Image (cartoon, helix red, strand yellow):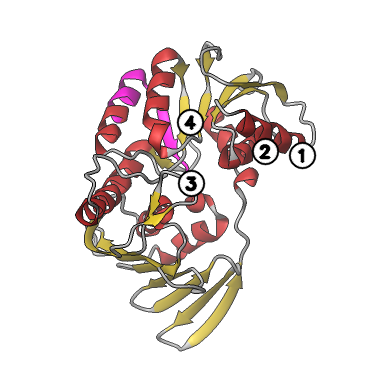
Amino acid sequence: MKNSTNSIVLIGGGQLGSRHLQGLANIDIPVSITVVDPSEISLKTARERYAQIAENPNIKEIKFSHCISDLFDRIDLAIVATGADVRADVVSSLVQQYSVRNLLLEKFLFQKESDFERIAGLLDRRQVNATVNCPRRLFPFYRQLKDALSSEDVISFSVAGSNWGMGCNAIHFLDLFAFLSGSSKVEVSGVSLDERILGSKRPGFVEFTGMIAGSSPRGDSFSISSLNEPDVPLKISIKTNSQLIEIDESAGKAFFYDELTSIKRQESFVLPYQSQMTGTVARDTLLSGVSGLTCYLESARLHIPVLSAFLTHLNRVSEKHYDHCPIT
């Protein structure tokens, strides 16, 4: 495999997809890449951002296309960076038309709960190795923090800040909670979402403010809050029996308070951009099938309780009945 050229398909070349492409442009094994997006504007963005990266001899070929009808006979890695509204159908079409070895999916995965089981069955039948891009568990800082928390019996995990896109991004923090606590099963037992449903940055989608909370079977607890008020920085707090850890990602700082000795220390860190990660994730996936990202089934177990909470709330406060939750 190391000496052969791997085929990569990137579906979705817009803002996030183009960052994935920049990461792929730095890959250190031979690959051929096809970027697919029906939007010429998105393909233009992808071309421009790809051109910003130095030429890499490992990129044997790169093509830009409007449709998935003319791809490689065998796809070694497909990255699906579309919106959640079309992702299930894109995955279904791709996997049924082509032999796909590995799949990397963006989140929020899907808007309908039924799509999680439908896609799970398809991936199983077609023997596709699928992961979901919640990358905090790959960040060096959080990997070190997980090691530091390994001796703790339980953790209490909370996130709060102003209007940070809870519908779209809550799954990132729930995945981080699962990673740090070591549990891929969670229960959402508390929902206190604001009645006013907000418009998303993208037309046709919605956003939420308020709080969801829950726990793991081990007894770890979490609360995730997006405040409908200005200027509250997003911060993560983790409390154990012996310490309190406060994390400010935007400042790149973490504060550790030892409650037994009252010692306080500060640690600085740098969080990588997506464009700095995709090349490594792709290489590891292609060579071993393992990247450190959350596998599809585990991520689905985390997605479904959040989706259910959002959809139930949306139907409670809306005059319209929704069979899907329009988040992306």
Q: Name the residue carrying label 1.
A: 52
Q: Outermost residue toward the right?
A: 54
Looking at this rendering, what residue extends furthest in the bottom direction?
262
Q: How far is disc 2 from disc 1 in space, using C-alphas?
A: 8 Å
Magenta stretch bounds: 120-133
Q: Earlier in the sequence, mark 3 or mark 2?
A: 2
Residue 113 percent across, percent down from the top left: 26, 39
Q: Is residue 322 left or right of residue 201?
A: left
Among the two numbered marks 2 and 1 on one chain, the one whose residue lies closer to the N terminus: 2
Q: What is the crowding at mark 2: few (fewer than 14 residues within 10 Å), some, or many (at least 20)?
A: many
User: What is the CA distance from the residue labelled 4 to the residue labelled 2?
Assistant: 21 Å
Front-lying residue, 272 or 189 = 189
Instruction: Single out the mark in the foreground, 3 or 2.
Output: 3
- Crowding at dot 3, Cα within 10 Å, few <14 / some 14-19 / many 20+, comes out as few
Disc number placed over residue 108 in the picture, else none: none
Do the numbered discs 2 and 1 sit on residues whose CB atoms are within 8 Å?
yes
Whichever of callouts 4 and 2 sits on the residue coming sooner in the sequence is: 2
Mark 2: which secondary structure? helix
Mark 4 and mark 3: Cα distance apart in space? 33 Å
Residue 242, image x and y in percent?
37, 79
| Residue 315: % across, % down | 22, 50
Could you say which is closer to the camera, residue 268 or residue 79? 79
Alpha carbons under labels 3 and 1: distance apart? 26 Å
